[in-house]
Image (cartoon, grey):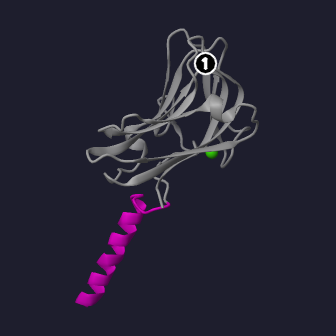
Amino acid sequence: MKKQLTTALAWMAIVLISSAGSAAGANMLYNGGFEGPVENGQPKGWKTTVNRNTTAEISLDSRERRNGQQSLKVAITPPGGRVIVYLEEAGAAPITPGADYEASCWIRTQNLDYNRFHEAPAFRLNFRPQRIRPGKVVDLINKLQGTSGWVQISQKATAPENSSRIHLDFVLTSGTVWIDDVSVQRAQ
Ligand SMILES: [Ca+2]
């Protein structure tokens, strides 16, 4: 009887570890596909901020999506400005300091451009409270110029010793961007 109980506890431990997302290959983001509900005007697990003097429309789009029922759509009117879409603290499982992580997303763009300050749209990966310097940044103009349709963008980073969570965001400047299937995984 005692042995059976020990086996059951061992099983529970395995299930708990894998559901916390620390196993390699599991997506640590809870709403990376933007399928969750809208809470306080924001997609669950995410926050969006629109800078002053920026005209933007942010919505969940059920027509243009890579997976599931919807994607996040951000449409910024020329001459552009700055919208930040960032992962909320509670939007991902905690990380293991010293481990390697790969962040990936799928993006589709239309009339993507710099803003009036010549700032480029970007997909950024970092950690908190301790950050990596420099942080990982993919310039979306550089990566997506001349493309149409959904494109996958990935980047890797090692979590610093005093970090406990991922900081992931999109800086959007001008034009329309659809984002779907965002994931962060332990690198294999
Ligand atoms: Ca989706």
Left or right of 125, for residue 109? right
What residue is rendered at 47% in x and 57% in y? 187
Q: Which residue is mark 1?
A: 56
Q: Residue furthest left?
A: 2
Residue 144 locus on image (x, y percent): 68, 34
Q: Quadrant of residue 115?
A: top right
Task: Write the start and end of the magenta stretch as one range.
Answer: 1-25
Residue 80 locus on image (x, y percent): 62, 14
Give the amino acid at mark 1: Ala
Using the image as rendered, state which of residue 89 and residue 187 is in the foreground. 187
Q: Secondary structure at mark 1?
A: strand
Does residue 50 sit above or below 43 in this rendering? above
Q: Is residue 23 within the magenta segment?
A: yes
Using the image as rendered, state which of residue 112 and residue 89 is in the foreground. 112
Using the image as rendered, state which of residue 182 and residue 115 is in the foreground. 115
What residue is rendered at 27% in x and 82% in y? 6
